[in-house]
Image (tube, helix red, strand yellow):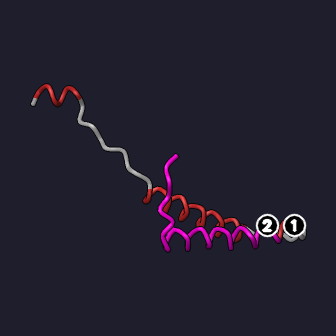
Amino acid sequence: MNELDMDEGLIAVVGLVREVHASISLAIGSGAVITTADYAALDGAVEGLLRAIDARLPQPVEQPATALKAVA
């Protein structure tokens, strides 16, 4: 498993996801109506989290095609 660098930026994004999720979870638990704005906020927060994680994971190194190596 890859380890994440939990720097201040990633910690802030995780905090935002937790904050948005907590308000929606609380509303659902109390029977309140969840709006599309609530879902949009959660969607945006999750997208930010996924991008932050992707930015910190090792990226695969692209290998040139074997045919191109043979031509060179």
Can residue 60 be seen from the camera position used here?
yes
The residue at the far left in this view is 72
Q: Residue at left 47%, top 62%?
A: 5
Q: Quadrant of residue 72?
A: top left
What amino acid type is highlighted by mark number 2? Ser
Q: Which mark is residue 17?
A: none
Residue 33, percent from left and from top = 84, 69
> Is 18 part of what is drawn in magenta?
yes
The residue at the far right in this view is 31
Q: Nearer the viewer, residue 13 or 38?
A: 13
Residue stretch in magenta = 1-26
Q: Quadrant of residue 71?
A: top left
Mark 1 neighbour density, 10 Å: few (under 14) some (14–19) many (20 or more) = few
Which residue, given by chain and number where applicable, does mark 1 sit on?
29
Q: Residue at left 74%, top 70%?
A: 22
Can residue 51 be seen from the camera position used here?
no
Residue 19, percent from left and from top = 68, 73
Direction from residue 39 to residue 63 in the image, left or right? left
Residues at marks 2 and 1 touching, judged by CB atoms closer than 8 Å? yes
Q: With respect to residue 44, does 57 lie above or below? A: above
Direction from residue 72 to residue 11 in the image, left or right? right
Direction from residue 26 to residue 4 in the image, left or right? left
Which residue, given by chain and number where applicable, does mark 2 sit on?
25
Q: Nearer the viewer, residue 33 or 63?
A: 63
Q: Main secondary structure of the magenta part?
A: helix
